[in-house]
């Protein structure tokens, strides 16, 4: 009898569980149906009234720590900030959809050259732009945003890029680096208010209007809301928590930040007051945080995401899918070497050792396991050398003349250089720690591969220790040597990272190895390199003569390879499935711009 | 009514004394001898254990896994860290079973263009086994196909991976049994250390009692109050990831349970007459503890140790799963599960085999410890 009761009880429990399951399923299927039908009804009305319609569902693989444009490090932060803020200029796809053009955002027209040389420029802004709360946007907002970015007490990581990139603003660098010394006044910086809607920029070297527009298109040069920025400033004005949560922010861009649930979701809605609101047909834009690639793929297949990145493990199943779109690799994944590290008799500072590493890596194998492109260069394949012809930098014979053959894989040479380096620093064996991002499947594959491959090339005297950490911790260690961070020269030995560089300006992208770049990964300082960078980016001759500029770019790239400033490994092109209901501004990837999701429209 | 003889009872006075016979005058009076051999503690337990079929099955299961953990990695030509990037993510292929269509190296490839199936540069001749689920997507005819993946990927005929290969072309059979070896090693070592510390600590606290006991028990409470994950993280920060950190993390708190149990056993037996007698005879404390009292706890100790082993394996897997496991390229059940789960949809074999193995191992150890508990302490049967 007891047994029967127990059996009955178990049966009842099973049934109740099953009932629970089916109920869940009903709810999940019911919700989208209702939403979809709701949307369809609205759509019917909206097609006629041309109202924004539909929500684009995108995702991020990790949480965003801040959307403060002056200090962010993750590209996702910049992307989100870009959608909800305004700059003076922006870039949009061109008419044919095969490239992009710079156009006005808050600016009323192109920058006006005020002198003969091209060192003084005035920009007038629109008078009808508004913040989310209805406040009018004036030139004071623009100047305040730039002043805060350069603020010497806040010491923002993006200050150097604001001060000098496509253009170098007079005294901006000196102002931002003076600390508390007060030797350069804000009035001395080449940013002046002309009237309530006009600003004047004075730069050190002659520049073109395109340079000014390119520079002001950068995320860190966009607007921040003064009252909000000030409200979250600490007492000694050395830090602000502006942009660290949704309520510490004020939008003014194509979308408004409606909700930011940390670790979970960003909800953006169409901003009807945005000055170019008519160009955006989406009623909303959502980002969910989905860390797991398989979950993201499942959500896409269920229709809960409109785009998904198909990783190396899944690509085989979707390689023929008509929805698959490809984008070129945004960065070259490299082994960063902390050449300032003093451990192991400072072997990481030894050029021969770094070159040994460079030649020891079988990039073809790495490309195979990551579904990427083997790369032993430092200017990515995507970079365009000539905007008119569309020729890429890598496709030019001159750009490959100095690139080591066989994708830089030469075991004998590597072993020879390794032995030489060990002898030079007086070591008989060497153990190095390779730090990697545990969340990245590719990182994990590569480090396990290197852990076996490098001792095979270098011999038993070499040992690689693998250290997994989260993305944030990796960044902290990678930049820990910098005086503005921990200032510990031994913060790391080897790690894996890549820089997302400009597609149209390969000479500019190489700034990450220059001595003045503030977001550096490796403590590499070389005056000769810096001089070439300055000449290529700021020199008038380079601006007028593209061939000369490309030649300077090659010189820089040659230095990065000859001195093994970083150890490039592979480029990872993106494979994306995009939902049928999304109509992209162009049919596919727009070089230098992306797919343009924010400008897409939705057709059910 | 019962008649009882008493000398002063007149009723019996008349009985002739000569009629009384001494019944056992010539025999020695003694207990009957056992006709069977005496059954000792362990034999008694073993008999009870064998009677439980499920425990025996569990024991066989464990022995089987132990056997493979020891000899499995040597059964084929691959090493646990032999990488071959031409053989990435292959499905399982077992030569004998392949003839029956099981583990024959087949894999379903979805979303293929029907018009591309004739392309022999992509699909070598004879690799397509089945075409199904034909449909039209965006005006393109699509289908799913099942292929002989070894042919499809151009793998030489004589190359087989029994359980498939992973993202670096490593043999999963070798890695799984190597992983089982590592996991079992971690489990046995940590449990052995736990039991050892627990016995000594619990015995001292229980035997001496009083203030000693009070202080020792408060110390265990302090140690026990620290969340285990925090302790593990601290060990890993200090010693780095690896077997040592995991064993230490498993040891640092887990001996407390054993210590408490032993202490309770000592409280139960230390006042017994035989202990008092020994003490009166001048037996030393050490001998009393380990020779006279501790053997009473052998049953619970063995049971407890057996129960702790699956716990340790599970903890190791859990730590590996959250990225605190042993260092690559070493393998463990947790490492394999963690990696396999990431590609569960694409290559289910990578998670299936380790999952089956850990399930068998866990169930077997739990059944075995249940059986042992019943065998050593029948009063707890079914508890």
Image (cartoon, rainbow, N blue to C red):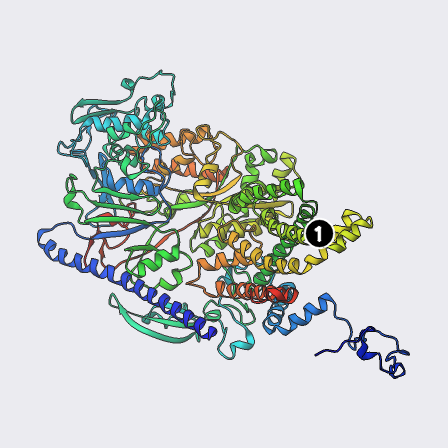
Q: Is residue A530 above or below residue B367?
A: above
With A539 as the anchor, is A114 left or right in this view? left
Nearer the observer, A575 or B59: B59
The image shows residue A563 at horizontal and vertical percentages of 50, 37
User: Which quadrant is the C terminus of chain A positioned in?
Assistant: bottom left
Residue drawn at the location 63% of the way across and 67% of the way down: B378
With A535 as the anchor, is B247 left or right in this view? right
Nearer the observer, A511 or A545: A511
Residue occupying the far front of the picture: B10
Q: Which residue corresponds to mark 1? A: B271
Q: Is residue B6 above or below residue A290?
A: below
**Label 1 chain ID:** B
Residue A437 seen anywhere in this rendered image of the structure = yes
Nearer the observer, A15 or B31: B31
The image shows residue B287 at horizontal and vertical percentages of 78, 51
Residue drawn at the location 53% of the way across and 65% of the way down: B359
Nearer the observer, B103 or A177: B103
Residue drawn at the location 36% of the way across and 44% of the way down: A63
């Amino acid at each position: 009898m007891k047994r029967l009761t127990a059996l009955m009880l178990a049966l009842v429990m099973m049934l109740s569980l099953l009932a629970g399951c089916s109920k869940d399923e009903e709810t999940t299927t019911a919700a989208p149906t209702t939403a979809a039908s709701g949307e369809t009804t609205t759509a019917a009305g909206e097609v006629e009234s041309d109202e924004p319609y539909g929500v684009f569902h995108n995702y991020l693989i990790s949480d965003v720590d801040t959307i403060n444009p002056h200090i962010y490090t993750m590209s996702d932060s910049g992307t989100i900030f870009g959608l909800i803020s305004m700059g003076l200029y922006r870039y949009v796809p061109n008419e044919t959809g095969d490239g992009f053009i710079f156009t006005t955002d808050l600016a009323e027209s192109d920058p006006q050259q005020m002198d003969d040389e091209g060192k003084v420029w005035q920009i007038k802004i629109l008078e009808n732009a508004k913040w989310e709360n209805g406040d009018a946007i004036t030139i004071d907002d623009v100047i305040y945003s730039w002043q805060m970015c350069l603020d010497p007490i806040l010491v923002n990581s993006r200050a150097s890029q604001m001060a000098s990139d496509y253009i170098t603003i007079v005294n901006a660098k000196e102002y931002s680096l003076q600390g508390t010394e007060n030797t350069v006044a804000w009035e001395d910086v080449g940013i002046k208010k002309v009237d309530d809607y006009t600003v004047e920029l004075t730069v050190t070297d002659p520049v073109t209007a395109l340079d000014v527009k390119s520079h002001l298109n950068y995320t860190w040069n966009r607007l921040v809301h003064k009252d909000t920025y000030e409200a979250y400033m600490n007492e000694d004005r050395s830090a602000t928590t502006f942009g660290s949560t949704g309520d510490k922010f004020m939008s003014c861009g194509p979308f408004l930040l409606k909700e930011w649930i940390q670790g979970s979701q960003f909800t953006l809605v169409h901003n009807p007051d945005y000055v170019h609101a008519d160009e955006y047909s989406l009623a909303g834009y959502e980002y969910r945080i989905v860390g797991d690639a398989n979950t993201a793929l499942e959500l896409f297949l269920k229709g809960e995401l409109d785009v998904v990145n198909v990783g190396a493990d899944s690509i085989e199943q979707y390689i023929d899918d008509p929805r698959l779109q490809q984008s070129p690799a945004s960065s070259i994944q490299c082994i960063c070497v902390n050449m300032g590290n003093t451990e192991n008799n400072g072997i990481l500072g030894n050029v021969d050792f770094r070159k040994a590493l460079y030649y020891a890596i079988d990039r073809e194998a790495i490309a195979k396991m990551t579904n990427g492109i083997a790369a032993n260069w430092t200017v990515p394949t995507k970079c365009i050398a000539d905007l008119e012809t569309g020729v890429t930098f890598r496709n030019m014979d001159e750009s490959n003349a100095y690139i080591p053959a066989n994708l830089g894989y030469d075991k004998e040479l590597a072993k020879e250089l390794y032995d030489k380096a060990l002898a030079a620093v007086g070591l008989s064996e060497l153990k190095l720690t390779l730090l990697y991002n545990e969340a990245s499947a590719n990182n994990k594959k590569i480090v396990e591969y290197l852990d076996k491959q490098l001792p095979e090339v270098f011999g038993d005297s070499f040992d690689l220790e693998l250290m997994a950490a989260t993305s944030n911790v990796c960044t902290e260690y990678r930049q820990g040597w910098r005086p503005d961070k921990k200032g510990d020269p031994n913060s790391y030995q080897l790690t894996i990272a890549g820089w997302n560089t400009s597609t149209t300006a390969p000479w500019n992208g190489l700034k990450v190895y220059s001595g003045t770049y503030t977001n550096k990964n490796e403590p590499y300082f070389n005056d000769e390199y810096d001089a070439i960078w300055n000449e290529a980016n700021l020199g008038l001759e380079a601006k007028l003569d593209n061939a000369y500029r490309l030649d300077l770019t090659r010189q820089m790239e040659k230095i990065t390879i000859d001195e093994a400033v970083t150890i490039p490994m592979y480029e990872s092109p993106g494979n994306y499935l995009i939902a049928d209901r999304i109509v992209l501004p162009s049919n596919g990837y727009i070089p230098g711009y992306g797919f343009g999701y924010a400008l897409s429209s939705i057709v059910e | 009514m019962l008649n009882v003889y008493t000398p002063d009872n007149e009723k019996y006075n008349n009985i002739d004394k000569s009629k009384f016979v001494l019944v056992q005058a010539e025999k020695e009076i003694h207990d009957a001898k056992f006709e069977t051999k005496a059954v000792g503690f362990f034999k008694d337990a073993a008999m009870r254990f064998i009677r439980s079929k499920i425990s025996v099955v569990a024991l066989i299961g464990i022995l089987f896994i132990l056997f493979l953990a020891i000899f499995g990695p040597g059964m084929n030509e691959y090493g646990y860290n032999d990488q071959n990037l031409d053989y990435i993510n292959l499905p399982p292929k077992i030569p004998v079973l392949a003839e029956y269509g099981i583990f024959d190296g087949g894999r379903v490839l979805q979303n293929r263009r029907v018009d591309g199936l004739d392309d022999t540069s992509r699909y070598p001749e004879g690799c397509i086994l089945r075409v199904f689920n034909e449909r039209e997507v965006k005006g393109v005819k699509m289908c799913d196909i099942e292929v002989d993946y070894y042919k499809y990927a151009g793998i030489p005929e004589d190359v087989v991976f029994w359980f498939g290969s992973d993202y670096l072309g490593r043999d999963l059979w070798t890695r799984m049994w190597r992983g089982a070896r590592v996991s079992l090693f971690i489990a046995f070592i940590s449990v052995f250390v736990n039991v050892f510390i627990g016995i000594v600590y619990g015995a001292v606290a229980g035997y001496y009692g009083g203030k000693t006991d009070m202080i020792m028990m408060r110390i265990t409470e302090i140690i026990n109050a620290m969340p285990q994950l925090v302790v593990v993280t601290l060990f890993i920060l200090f010693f780095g990831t690896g077997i040592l950190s995991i064993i230490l993390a498993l040891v640092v708190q887990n001996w407390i349970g054993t210590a408490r149990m032993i202490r309770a056993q000592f409280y139960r037996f230390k006042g017994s007459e035989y202990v008092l007698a020994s003490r009166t005879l001048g037996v030393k404390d050490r001998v009393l503890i380990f020779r006279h009292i501790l053997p009473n706890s052998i049953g619970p100790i063995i049971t407890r140790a057996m129960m702790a082993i699956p716990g340790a394996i599970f903890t190791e897997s859990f730590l590996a799963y959250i990225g605190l496991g042993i260092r690559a390229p070493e393998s463990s059940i947790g490492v394999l599960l963690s990696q396999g789960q990431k590609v569960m949809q694409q290559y289910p074999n990578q998670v299936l085999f380790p999952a089956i193995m850990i399930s068998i191992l866990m169930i077997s150890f739990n059944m075995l410890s249940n059986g042992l508990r019943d065998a050593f302490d029948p009063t707890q049967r079914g508890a």
